Image: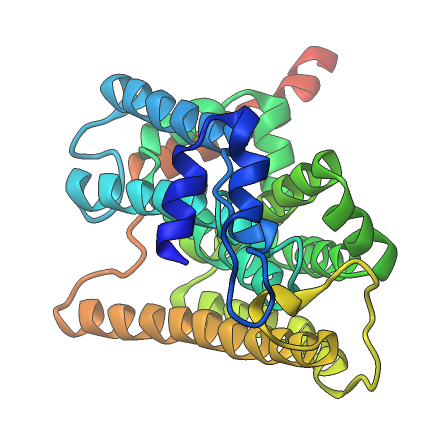
Amino acid sequence: MVACLSVVSAAPRARRGAARHACPVAGSGRLPSVWIWGPHVAAVSAVVLVGVAYVAVVRIFGGPEGGPGGPRRRHAAFAAALVLSAVFLTWPVADLAQRSLLVRMAQQTILLLAVPPLALLGLPRRLVDAMTRPAVLDWAARSLTRPAVATVLFNIGVLVVYLPPVMNTTVRSWPARAGVDLTLLLAGVIMWVPALRVLPGTGQLRPTGRAGYLMIQSVIPSFASLVFIFARHPLYSAFDPSSIGITTLVDQQLAGALAKVASLAVLIGAAATLLWRSHQIEERGGDPDPLTWDDVERELRRLERRQRPTDSTT
C-alpha cells in the first residue's frame, strides 16, 4: 500500500486515475479513494494564514505580561493548536471523516476540546484586551461567556451538529462542513473562556467554580453519546466506514464511546488540574486568581460607560 500511495502521489494529475486502478489492495482489488493523498488547499491556507497573523500580532502585543506561563509556553500552546488543526483538517483524517463517524467524532472532539483552549492560552493578554475593548465587543464577549449562557450555547451547538440532517449534509457538502467546523471552534471558544479566565474584567469564577463549570460541560454530550452506543440501527445515511474495515453500526457505537471517554477525560482532567494548581499556589501563600491592572481598567471603563447617560441627563 505504501508503494501504491507513493506512485499515485507522484503521478501527474492526468494519469492519477490510471495509477489508482493499477494499485490493488488485498481483499478489495483496488485502493479506496480515501487513501489517495489529496491537497486540502482551503484548510492548509487557513492554518498558514492564522500562523502568520499570530506571529505578526505577537510582535505588536507580545511581551512578558502577554499571557500566563511566559511567552515560550504561550507560543507553544498556540503552535500546538495550529498543528492539531493541520493534522485533523487535512488528509487522511479529513478524508476518512467523510466516510466514518468515528473519525468525524475524533476530528470534532479536537475542534471542540483541544484547539480552542490551546489557542486561547496562546493569545497575548494585551491582544485580547485590545480586541474586546470597544463597548459593543466588550458587552458581547461578556454576555456570551457568562457560565450559564456559555453552557447553553455550547450544548446546543454540539447537539445541533449531530442531528441527522445536519450531519448528512456536512458529509456531502464541503461548504456545510467548513461552516460546521467553524461553528464547533466558536462553540469551543465560548465554552472555554469562563474556565481559562482570559477576558479582562473582574467578577469571574474562582477556581472551584471553574472546575465545577467544566464538569457540567461533560454531562449533556456524555448522555448524547449513549444514543450512539445503544442505537440498534445507523442514525446517518452518509457514512460508509468500509474503508477502515468496520460496519456502519459498529462505527457509530465506537464514535459514541470515543465521545463519552474523550469529553470526560478532557473536561474532568482540566477541572482537576485547575483545582490542583490552585491548591499549590495557596499552599505557597499566593493568590490563584490575582487581580491585574487589565481587570481594574476594564471595570473602570464599564463603570464610566454606565455613568455617561446619568451625567448627560443631569
Identify which residue is drawn at 27% across, 40% down: 67
Which residue is located at x 16 percent, y 74 percent? 283
Q: Residue at x 65, y 68 (%)?
A: 242
Residue 23 image offset from top left, x and y in percent: 49, 52
Q: Is residue 162 above or below residue 282?
A: above
Q: Position of residue 104 (x, y in %)?
A: 61, 59
Asked if one can make out residue 169 in the rendered structure from this viewpoint, the answer is yes
Q: Position of residue 278 (x, y in %)?
A: 28, 69
In-image side of 237 versus 119 (left or right): right
Residue drawn 37% across the image and 49% down it:
118
Answer with the quarter of the image where residue 284 lies: bottom left
Q: How is the image coloured?
A: rainbow
Report the number of discs.
0
Viewer-proximal residue among 16 and 147? 16
Q: Nearer the viewer, residue 212 or 201?
A: 212
With 101 as the anchor, is 76 left or right in this view?
left
Residue 75 in picture, x, y percent from top left: 24, 39
Residue at the extreme left of the image, as rendered: 284
Q: Is residue 107 left or right of residue 236?
A: left
Q: Is residue 212 visible?
A: no
User: In the rendered view, does 50 fall on the left or right side of 65?
Assistant: right
Residue lying farthest to the right in this orientation: 165
Please determine whether, in this image, residue 215 is positioned above or below residue 119: below
Question: Quick check: 291 above or below 43?
Answer: below
Q: Quadrant of the N terminus?
A: bottom left
The quarter of the displayed image where residue 287 is located:
bottom left
Q: Quadrant of the C terminus?
A: top right
